[in-house]
Amino acid sequence: MAVGRTLNRYSRVYVDGYDLSGHTRSIGPLACTFQEGNDDPLTADVIGTWLGQATISCGTINAMFDNTLVTGMHPILKTPPAKRSVMIPIGIRAAPAQGDPVFCGQFNQSDYMTDPGVTPSALTIKFSPSAADATTLAYADPWGILLHANSYTSDLNAANGIDLIAATSDGGYMAYQVFSASGAGHTANIIVEDGLTAGGAYTTIVSTGVIDVGTAPIAGIVAMATTASVRQFIRWQVAWGTATNITFALAFVRGKPR
Amino acid sequence: MTIYGRTVGKFCKFQISDSSTTLRDIPVSSFGSVGLTYAEQDVTALQDAISSVLNGQGSFSTTITGPFDNSTDVAASTTTQRPALSGSHDCLNGLNGGQVAKTFGIYLGIRADWAAGDPVFGAAKSCLISGYTVDPGAGTYSAKLVIAGNRSGDPSWGTAQLAAATT
């Protein structure tokens, strides 16, 4: 994990368990804006503002048209409308790594528009704000941290993970993208653990439950209760079932006071 | 000693108290328009030779933009110091949608880093962030700053460093 400023080329776009970074030119704007209401009684010299509900959107994917079987943009996204689990890690002057910022949520794909006349033939895909049946409706924050960059894993995690500086009691949610696994019907449980101290005891705070990772690509979001505790250190973990390896990305968004 | 006269953009800075109430310098590339705007109420009568207005309530909001940056937080600068930049991402995303009014200041250094006596617009415990948007393609953010309904004071022009107060 690095800190500082970065470039577009180090962002990645994951949708429903597919890594679309090889087709995508840009995505965004990645927005979280709050409804504003005026506080303007007769006695006020200056008008104030109260904030209401958030609108979260990942904007539009600008991409190159590609009908490659299975992994091309065309077979994956040609049939809107559909709810999509989206994860956009922002690598800091390098490919995304553990600890980097990540934008995630579940959004309705509302169009699929090609421009055949340009070279190469282009594609735009618009996402509407958060889906009505998204599992994140209790959380007005799409920004989390990447706990597991898109990579192959076959072991348990014994590392200390990420230091969040302090514990909170505002819940949070995990977002996962499973790109591939060891074989059909193979199972595993992808977990976020927290701990009081680095290297101390870690316990599960949220998980996918046992899922058939063999059906990858799969993706989803699992939310905690909005009053759940999250201790200072968090890390990824896998409880292996019949699967022996998974290639996946995992992010965690810690809740904020409402 | 206070310098008077004109200045340039490279000597301005933006400070805001983060979610843990500590002041941070945030990297900014544009501020929009800074200052209070008062509503104009037209009170002209047909019998007047000229139109006339009364000013109503003041308002302020601005959208700042700057580089997306997740740098580690550092202590904010004070008088005569170069801005000590913390990351824009952690600070502004942490404040986005919050209901607790925050201290902010937009400092205009006069041909040098800001020093006590130079102009500053802001107020203690006075603002909220109502939107935070990242454009990965440009490597930038934009954030909208509004005046809080539950503020402690109205923003105004002054010449003293704004303290983080208690929020």
Image (cartoon, coloured by chain):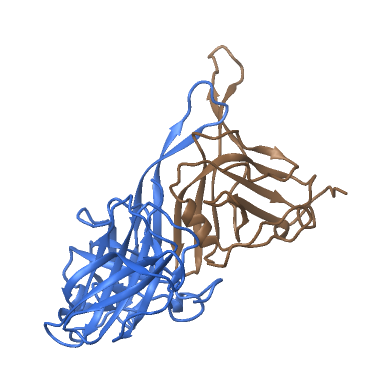
Q: Nearer the viewer, residue A199 or A7?
A: A199
In which quadrant of the rendered view does residue B111 lie?
A: bottom right
Foreground of the two, A92 or B67: A92
Q: Between A191 and A219, which is closer to the camera in this rendering?
A: A191
Split into 4 quadrants, where in the image is the C terminus of chain A?
Answer: top left
Extreme residue in the right direction? B1
Residue at image x 37%, y 52%?
Answer: A170
Residue at the image point whose x is 41% and y is 78% from the top:
A159
- Residue at the far top: name it: B47
The residue most toward the front is A201
Q: Position of residue A174 (x, y in %)?
A: 31, 65
Q: Position of residue A189 (x, y in %)?
A: 22, 74
Left/right placement of residue A173 relative to residue A7 reads: left
Q: Colour of chain A?
A: blue
Q: Position of residue A202 (x, y in %)?
A: 36, 69
Residue positioned 38% across, 70% down in the render: A201
Q: Is residue B158 left or right of residue A245?
A: right
Work out whether residue B15 can be spotted: yes
Question: Does residue B158 lie above or below B2 as drawn?
Answer: above
In the rendered picture, chain B carries what hue? brown
Residue A51 image point, x, y percent = 42, 41
Q: Is residue A124 above or below residue B13?
A: below
Would you say residue A72 is visible in this rendering?
no
Total residue callouts: 0
Residue A79 falls in which quadrant of the image?
bottom left
In the picture shown, does residue B158 fall above or below A175?
above
Up-down relation of residue A9 to residue B45 (above or below): below
